[in-house]
Image: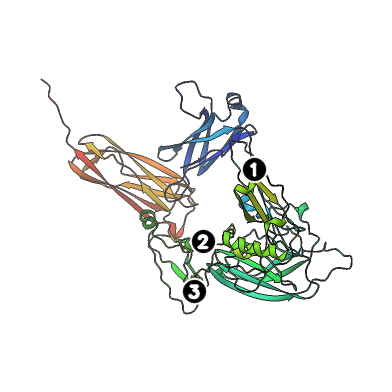
């Protein structure tokens, strides 16, 4: 049984909706009657007792039952006590065939005022580039507070105002050639080479370079560039704008070896040596380089009938097949190898989300070179109004309010050894005089040379494959079920309710028999009865037995599908569904009646 109450109730809610579902362990839907009680209760336990307001709904169900009612019925009881009350839901299902009752209770949600918790940082880039679109996403979540949400994005710096931006990839990419759109500002006037590199599983999976040339249209604008939001589901149709910058399209060959996540790095080198770069991480469909498929044909069959197992794989594959009853996995826990289990450890090698900051030594070395290049040799050349006692404890550190192309390489987990000019951002000196702090900003930076360095990681490969599970159901048209008490007394009248479930879509006639036994007497006039059962329905028959022997006795009920007759004209099942048998044997412990004498 599954009870699904509403996830959220607030002062803007107009209707309370939920669902109750009930099915047998073998998957068939339960047919019966349902009752749902929705109440307003205290969020915290108190000693005060009062009548709780409730709404009760009755109905009939076959598998699932959806309920809904106007919240105005309960609103007067909670409208002045938001965040102190909650919704409590109780549901009970009466099975039509056996009369058994199952129930479930769910506490929550808390009744709140309407609030939205905006999540910006999880889905938004932490850098922005001048002249290029900056995409941010707000996600709604339940919240009981009204805290403000803030988000900071750092400006990407280029001394030549040259930037490259990968159009955001929000969907999961399938293997094969995939187009990727790049936007550029201030591109070279001549043909230039764009280097493309893909990192996944801690190693380089793809590397290519192609030449491109951007020609300015006659009207002097780039409005015919690729639309920014064309492939994004988060953008509405009227927001699919194209920035007034040129764009180029590259073809990326995505392979299964890049799953589950890959990081794309693109960059080009300007004639003056400046590196213009960008990076983007994206999900890759989980697949294997050596796929294997397995299926049963047919997927449903009667017990004892043959079925065919089809297996397909690449030539030269070594395949291992395991076929067990589903109950083995239900009882054995997590002992089944699945594709998810194989890909889960690889997520450890996904790209980092935040670029690591430069060490103090690295930043100091770079900024000292930057200051020297711009004619600033020592701090005396910077004009500050310093208190007369500042000389007692004077020190300074370097910092920068910008990021540059070195961040793209860091986010790609790459280390550069060579003469690439990755760093170009301007520096600041932050002076500290005892408790006083003064900052001085310098002008725009010219191009400067610095090499970046980091450590590499070993590659990880996945050369084998696990297919998705294939299943075959041993489909019995009907089956018999009954229960007995654990123990009884000799001579006691024991009611025995036998239920027959029909899983066919057609009606069938069942011959139900309680087998003869010397261990008990049957009070019914007949041991055999006939019943008509239509598709996905169940019917029951009541027997009464009286145990005669002491100890464990066996009780056997047997059912058989037979052709329909005048007593069951609705029967439409034919062929293999006729003549099927099912039997159930249960044990009953019979004890001696004890007599007590009191004196």
Q: Which residue is identified by label 3?
A: 313
Q: Residue at x 65, y 47 (%)?
A: 151
| Residue 359 screen position, x and y as percent | 57, 60
Identify the secondary structure beneath mark 1.
loop
Mark 3 or 1, closer to the camera: 1
Task: Judge by depth and name the residue closer to the eye, 520 or 301.
Answer: 301
Helix, strand or loop at label 3? It is strand
Which residue is identified by label 2? 347
Disc 3/disc 2 C-alpha distance (Å): 26 Å
Image position of 558 (left or right of 293): left
- Residue extending farthest bottom: 316
Identify whether 452 is placed above or below 530.
Answer: below
Mark 1 against mark 2, which lies toward the viewer?
1
The answer to whether 115 is drawn above or below residue 596 in the figure is: below
Query: 5 and 190: which one is in front?
Result: 190
Q: Residues within 10 Å of mark 2 (few under 14, many from 20)?
A: few
Residue 132 visible: yes
Q: Which numbered tag is attached to residue 149?
A: 1
Determine crowd level at label 1: few under 14, some 14-19, many 20+ residues with C-alpha closer than 10 A. few
């Amino acid at each position: 049984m599954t009870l699904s109450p509403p996830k959220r109730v607030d002062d803007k809610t107009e209707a309370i909706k939920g669902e109750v579902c009930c099915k047998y362990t073998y998957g068939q839907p339960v047919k019966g009657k349902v009752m749902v009680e929705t109440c307003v209760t205290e969020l915290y336990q108190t000693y005060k007792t009062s009548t709780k307001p409730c709404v009760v709904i009755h109905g009939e169900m076959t598998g699932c039952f959806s309920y809904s009612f106007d919240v105005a019925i309960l609103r007067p009881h909670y409208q002045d006590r938001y965040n102190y009350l909650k919704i409590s839901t109780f549901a009970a299902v009466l099975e039509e065939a056996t009369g058994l009752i199952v129930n479930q209770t769910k506490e929550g949600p808390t009744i709140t005022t309407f609030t939205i918790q905006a999540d910006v940082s999880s889905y938004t880039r932490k850098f922005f580039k001048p002249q290029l679109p900056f995409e941010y996403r707000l996600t709604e979540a339940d919240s009981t507070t009204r805290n403000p949400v803030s988000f900071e994005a750092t400006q990407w710096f280029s001394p030549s105002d040259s930037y490259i931006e990968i159009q955001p990839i929000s969907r999961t990419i399938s293997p094969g050639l995939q187009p990727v759109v790049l936007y550029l500002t201030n591109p070279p006037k001549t043909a230039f080479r764009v280097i493309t590199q893909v990192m996944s599983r801690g190693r380089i999976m793809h590397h290519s370079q192609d030449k491109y040339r951007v020609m300015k249209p006659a009207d002097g604008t780039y409005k015919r560039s690729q639309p920014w939001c064309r492939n994004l589901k988060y953008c509405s149709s009227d927001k699919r704008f194209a920035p007034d910058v040129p764009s180029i399209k590259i073809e990326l060959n995505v392979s299964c070896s890049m799953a589950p996540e890959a990081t794309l790095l693109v960059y080009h080198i300007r004639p003056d040596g400046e590196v213009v770069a960008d990076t983007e991480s994206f999900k890759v469909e989980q697949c294997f380089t050596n796929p294997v498929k397995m299926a049963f044909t047919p997927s449903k069959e009667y017990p004892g009938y043959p079925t065919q197992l089809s297996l397909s794989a690449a030539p030269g594959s070594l395949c291992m097949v395991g076929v067990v009853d589903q109950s083995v996995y239900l009882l054995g826990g997590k002992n089944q190898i699945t594709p998810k289990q194989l890909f889960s450890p690889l997520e450890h090698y996904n790209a980092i989300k935040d670029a690591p900051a430069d060490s103090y030594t690295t930043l100091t070395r770079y900024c000292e070179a930057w200051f020297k290049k711009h004619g600033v040799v020592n701090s005396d050349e910077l004009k500050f109004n310093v208190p007369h006692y500042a000389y007692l404890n004077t020190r300074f550190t370097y910092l920068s309010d910008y990021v540059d192309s070195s961040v793209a390489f860091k986010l790609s987990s790459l280390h550069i050894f060579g003469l690439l000019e990755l760093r170009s951002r301007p520096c600041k000196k932050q002076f500290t005089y005892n408790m006083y702090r003064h900052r001085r900003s310098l002008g725009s930076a010219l191009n400067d040379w610095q090499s970046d360095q980091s450590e590499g990681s070993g590659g990880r490969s996945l050369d084998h494959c696990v297919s998705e599970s294939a299943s075959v159901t041993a489909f019995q048209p009907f089956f018999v079920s009954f229960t007995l008490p654990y123990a009884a007394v000799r001579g006691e009248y024991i009611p025995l309710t036998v239920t027959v479930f029909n899983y066919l879509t057609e009606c069938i006639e069942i011959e139900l028999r309680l087998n003869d036994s010397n261990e008990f007497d049957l009070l019914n006039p007949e041991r055999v009865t006939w019943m008509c059962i239509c598709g996905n329905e169940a019917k029951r028959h009541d027997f009464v037995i009286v145990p005669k022997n002491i100890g464990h006795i066996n009780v056997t009920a047997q059912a058989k599908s037979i052709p329909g007759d005048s007593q069951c004209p609705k029967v439409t099942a034919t062929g293999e569904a006729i003549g099927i048998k099912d039997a159930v044997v249960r044990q009953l412990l019979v004890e001696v009646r004890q007599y007590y004498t009191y004196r």
